[in-house]
Image (cartoon, grey):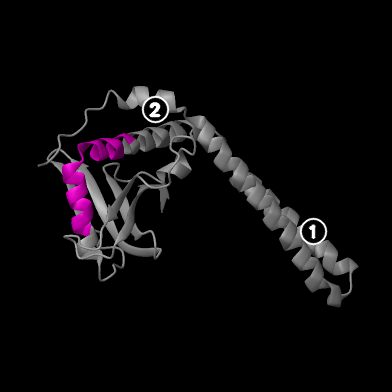
C-alpha cells in the first residue's frame, strides 16, 4: 500500500501533485490537450526505500493514464512502466512525457529524492517510537471478550426479533469508535516526526547523481 506525500506530511505542500504539465493540441506525445498531473506515492511500510510510484492523470477527463515505477540507484534515476498495475492504451505516451520531464528538470528529481528521504526517515522514527510501546494483543483480546459478553447479555435479555436491530446499533457504535481511534492514530503519527528534524537527517544522505 502506498500513500501520497501530502497525506504523510499534510503541511508540507499546498498541492496534491508533484508536477503539472500542460500540453497543446499539437504535441510530440500524441496525447489530448490539457493539463497532466504527476502524483508521487510512497510505501506505507518501507521495503525498498529507493522506489516510488508516479501516477499520471489527465486533469480534464480525470482519466488515469499510467502507473510508473521510479527508482533511485547508484547509476542514477530509472523509470519504467509498473508491471504490477493495469495500464491504459496511452500509458507508453504518458511514460515518454514523464521521462522527458524528469530528464529536462533536475529540480523535479531533487524534489522527489527529498520527499523519498523524508518518508524514509519518518518510517525509521516511527519504528523506533513504536518499538517502545507495549503490545496490544492482550487489549484486543479483552475487547473481543467484552463484545462477546455484551452480545450474550443482549440475546438473553431481549426477544429474538430485537436481536437484529440491537446488533446493528452495536456494530454502528463499534464502527464509530474504531474510526475515531484510527483518526487519532493518524494524527499522532504525523506528530511523531518534525519536518525540521527530517531535513537535518536527510542532509547527511548523499543524493545520487542524475542520469543523462
Q: Is residue 97 magenta-colored? A: yes
Tag on residue 198?
2
Tag on residue 150?
1
Determine whether 142 is above or below 10 in the image. below
Q: Which quadrant would residue 27 be assigned to in this image?
A: bottom left
Answer left or right for 97 relative to 35.
Answer: left
Answer left or right for 33 relative to 171.
Answer: left
Q: Nearer the viewer, mark 2 or mark 1?
A: 2
Secondary structure beneath dot 2 equals: helix
In which quadrant will I find the N terminus? bottom left
Q: Is residue 4 magenta-colored? A: no
Q: Nearer the viewer, residue 159 or 105?
A: 105
Tag on residue 3?
none
Secondary structure beneath dot 1 equals: helix
The earlier-in-sequence mark between 2 and 1 is 1
Q: Is residue 141 visible?
A: no
Instruction: Determine crowd level at label 2: few under 14, some 14-19, many 20+ residues with C-alpha closer than 10 A.
Output: some
Amino acid at each position: 500500500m502506498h500513500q501520497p506525500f501530502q497525506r504523510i506530511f499534510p503541511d508540507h505542500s499546498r498541492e496534491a501533485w508533484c508536477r503539472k504539465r500542460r500540453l497543446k493540441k499539437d504535441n510530440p506525445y500524441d496525447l489530448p490537450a490539457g493539463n497532466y498531473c504527476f502524483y508521487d506515492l510512497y510505501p506505507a511500510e518501507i521495503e525498498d526505500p529507493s522506489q516510488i510510484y508516479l501516477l499520471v492523470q489527465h486533469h480534464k477527463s480525470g482519466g488515469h493514464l499510467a502507473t510508473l515505477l521510479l527508482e533511485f540507484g547508484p547509476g542514477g534515476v530509472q523509470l519504467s512502466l509498473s508491471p504490477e498495475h493495469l495500464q491504459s492504451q496511452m500509458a507508453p505516451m504518458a511514460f515518454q512525457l514523464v521521462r522527458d520531464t524528469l530528464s529536462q528538470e533536475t529540480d523535479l528529481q531533487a524534489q522527489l529524492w527529498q520527499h523519498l528521504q523524508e518518508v524514509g526517515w519518518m518510517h525509521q522514527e516511527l519504528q523506533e517510537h513504536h518499538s517502545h510501546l507495549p503490545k496490544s494483543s492482550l487489549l484486543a483480546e479483552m475487547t473481543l471478550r467484552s463484545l462477546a459478553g455484551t452480545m450474550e447479555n443482549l440475546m438473553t435479555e431481549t426477544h429474538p426479533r430485537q436481536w437484529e436491530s440491537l446488533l446493528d446499533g452495536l456494530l454502528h457504535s463499534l464502527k464509530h469508535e474504531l474510526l475515531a481511534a484510527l483518526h487519532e492514530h493518524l494524527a499522532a503519527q504525523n506528530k511523531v516526526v518534525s519536518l525540521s528534524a527530517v531535513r537535518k537527517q536527510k542532509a547527511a544522505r548523499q543524493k545520487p547523481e542524475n542520469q543523462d
